[in-house]
Image: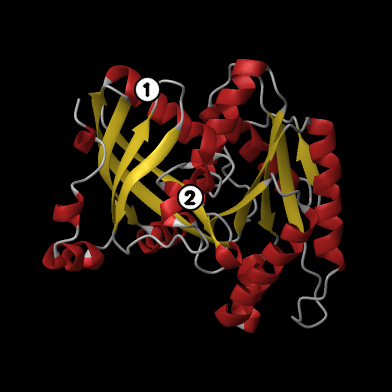
């Protein structure tokens, strides 16, 4: 097959208006060639949308490795697998990856490319576009949809999503998993006495104090009002109880700035039983929380099964 199937016609590429057009594109037009031995190089690169500071594009025309080495570590093997699959099946490449830039910056790049078999291997013609701003905006919107506005903790939606993921792992591999539910005692009287602004500040401080005790892999969420939940992966009930007691003591010892009254929490805990659904686990931990309230508040309860009806139970 003629060589100009791989290398662009230089006379065409040197036409002034075409050069100006490619330089104005919000991305990079490229040809990527893969030899039978796996060697990759870029016969053609044009455009300014993707920064490749510190890379010589002439060198890339001989060897694509310097650019590929800029990929974020988890993305390199994935992209290589995508290229291999495209070469074998002739299907287009449509993927994203992260590219390290000077100054420890990272850019998200979207690539779309169509493969064609040539005598010397496989040739892709495609476009790379920097989508970093789009990814940042999507991440911001995702955080907003998963975050409680007042405390900055996860919200109920995020908790349920993560809980379902952890339940699946626990059921599949028999891994321990515990859930904690906590509630501020007599919170209504705090709002009535000190006002809702002070009540909101108490909730924010509780979230901050709790976050300082939890592990990175734990997830604390505000379910609504003064009720919170803590998801504890790889944690049996005995360890969950120890953590709950530490949390209860920390809250009871803290000065929330609401006069001389002590602020306390009641906590219910439960460990997931393999095969049980999310609804069963949440019902069990909720029953434990009610038991902690019924028993006098400011305590941790686990593994209890009080009657289903809570008529006459003291307000939380």
* Residue 85 disc label: 1
**N-terminal of the two: label 1 or label 2?**
1
Q: Position of residue 167 (x, y in %)?
A: 58, 27
Q: Position of residue 314 (x, y in %)?
A: 65, 53
In this view, the residue in front, 72 or 190, is: 72
Q: Residue at x 43, y 35 (%)?
A: 40
Res. 136 visible in picture: yes
The answer to whether 206 is drawn above or below residue 95 in the figure is below
Q: Are marks 1 and 2 in contact (CB under 8 Å)?
A: no
Q: Residue at x 32, y 62 (%)?
A: 49
- Residue bearing mark 2: 98
- Marks 1 and 2, Cα distance to the nearest angstrom? 20 Å
* Residue 100 disc label: none
Res. 298 visible in picture: no
Image position of 40 (left or right of 194)? left
In this view, the residue in front, 255 or 113, is: 113
Image position of 304 (left or right of 249)? left
Q: Residue at x 57, y 81 (%)?
A: 197
> Picture quarter containing residue 270?
top right
Callout 2: SS: strand
Q: Point out the image quarter for the N terminus.
A: top left
Q: Position of residue 118 (x, y in %)?
A: 25, 24
> Picture quarter containing residue 112?
top left
């Amino acid at each position: 097959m003629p060589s100009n199937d791989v290398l662009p016609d230089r006379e065409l590429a040197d036409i002034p208006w075409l050069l100006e057009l490619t330089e104005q594109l919000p991305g990079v037009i490229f040809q990527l060639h893969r030899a039978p031995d796996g060697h990759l190089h870029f016969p053609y690169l044009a455009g300014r949308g993707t920064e490749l500071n510190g890379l010589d594009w002439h060198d890339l025309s001989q060897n694509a490795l310097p650019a590929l080495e800029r990929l974020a570590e988890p993305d390199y093997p994935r992209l290589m697998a995508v290229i291999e699959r495209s070469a074998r099946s002739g299907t287009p490449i449509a993927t994203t990856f992260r590219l390290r830039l000077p100054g420890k910056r990272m850019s998200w790049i979207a690539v779309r490319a169509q493969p064609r078999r040539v005598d010397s291997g496989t040739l892709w013609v495609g476009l790379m576009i920097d989508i970093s701003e789009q990814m940042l905006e999507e991440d911001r919107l995702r955080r907003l949809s998963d975050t409680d506005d007042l405390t900055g903790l996860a919200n109920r939606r995020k908790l349920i999503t993560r809980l379902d993921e952890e339940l699946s792992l626990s059921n599949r591999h028999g891994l321990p998993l515990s859930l904690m539910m906590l509630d501020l005692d007599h919170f209504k009287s705090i709002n009535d006495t000190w006002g809702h602004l002070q009540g909101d500040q108490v909730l924010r401080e509780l979230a901050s104090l709790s976050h300082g005790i939890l592990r990175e892999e734990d997830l604390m969420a505000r379910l609504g009002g003064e009720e919170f939940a803590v998801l504890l992966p790889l944690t049996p009930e005995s360890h969950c109880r120890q953590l709950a007691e530490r949390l209860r003591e920390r809250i009871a010892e803290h000065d929330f700035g609401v006069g001389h009254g002590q602020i306390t929490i009641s906590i219910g805990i439960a460990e997931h039983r393999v095969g049980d659904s999310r609804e069963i686990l949440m019902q069990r931990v909720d029953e434990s929380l009610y038991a902690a309230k019924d028993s006098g508040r400011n305590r941790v309860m686990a593994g209890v099964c009080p009657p289903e009806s809570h008529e006459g139970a003291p307000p939380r």
